Amino acid sequence: PPTTPVGPSQPPPSRVATGVRIEGPSSIAPGASVQYRLVASFDDGTTSDVAAQATWTTGNASVLTASPGGIVRGASRGESALSARYLTQTTHIYVLVLEDGTYRLSGRVTESGGGLPGARIDVVAGRGAGLSATTEFSGSYALYGVAGEVRIEATLDGFEKARRTIVVSEHSTADLVLRPAVAPANLNGDWRLTLSASSACTPPVPEDAATRSYAATVSQIGTFVRVELRSPELTTPEARVEGIVIDRRLTFRLPLDDFYYAAYGLRYYTLIEALGPTRFLAIAGTAHGERLGSAVTGTLDGEFALYLGGGGSGVRNRQFSCWRSDHAFRLDRN
């Protein structure tokens, strides 16, 4: 049959957006507002600024705020993601909030190659004096608003203080190494790790998931430790986590990647155990404990969660979750 012609009396077929990109400065001064563009590409080869039709959000509203239409304001020094969504297309960039003529200084604080969480970094001289930051679990830090010759200082309980002077004329990196003030306990060897859910979880964690045990091999260099967990029920051949030992105190982390994929119902954990064909236990959080005799005991600040589907390091269809700071862990020497 003949096709229907598209003439003046009929509108042309609708364009389909195939991608979007944000256009605008990579940094904003605190208190300043800037108009950003969202350029959409269409399947007919054309482009258009669709900022007014998009939804704008930021990752950290204390640093960066976004208003309808793509007007973005710097709230305080720092860094934040800026995201825009038009129809089914989404994109994001990272924006720094800094005074003109100043920069970001970032780096890691380490010992024996491992990152040290909780270390304090202070700018003690130069432009930006008085600024401070605390390292994340990987030992990383970032200072915003420094320039010229600056002196920084790193401190952490149980370690000797470290200082460094650096000339900052662009976004720069400065790593520092701390030395333990006291030799750490030696945890090298084979252990058994037991994780127990808090009895205060409401509703209670099911009995077959409340206490789980895994073979654990600890490799330690200085204060840095790597723990390899093994069990026939783990959904990966082994779960590998990292931590530090300060004197007799052990801290290690069971990571959870919940930044992006959770929007699609999928979460990634380091420790996932199959309790049956369709039931999976996932455990995440940060463990803090102290060695006393042949055992290390303490608490896990984190989550026990049950899922109905998964495999490898990913799970979906969460059935139950208990986030608390008083889950328990115990390492016993084999």
Image (cartoon, rainbow, N blue to C red):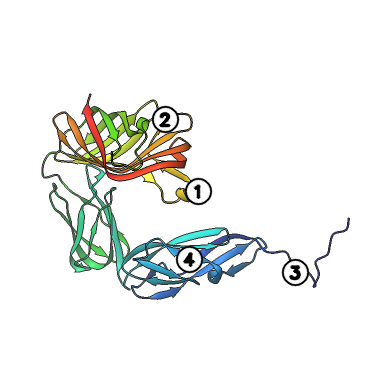
Residue at mark 3 to residue at mark 2: CA–CA distance: 58 Å
Q: Which residue is mark 1?
A: 264
Residue mark closest to the camera, 2 vs 4: 2
User: Which of the 4 image quadrants contains residue 191?
Assistant: top left
Numbered label attached to residue 275: 2
Secondary element at tag 4: strand
Location of the C terminus (image quadrant): top left
| Mark 2 or mark 4: whose residue is earlier in sequence | 4
Of callouts 3 and 1, the N-terminal one: 3
Instruction: Give the distance between the C-alpha atoms of the residues marked 3 and 4, in whole angstroms.
Output: 30 Å
Under mark 1, the amino acid is Tyr
Circle 3 packing at 10 Å, graded few (<14), some (14-19), many (20+), is few
| Percent of width and height locating residue 319 | 44, 41
Image mark for residue 11: 3
Tell me the amino acid under the disc marked 2: Leu
Mark 3 is on which residue type? Answer: Pro
Q: Are marks 3 and 2 in contact (CB under 8 Å)?
A: no
Instruction: Tell me which corner region of the image, top left, top right, bottom left or bottom right, holds residue 180.
Output: top left
**Which residue is identified by label 4?**
56
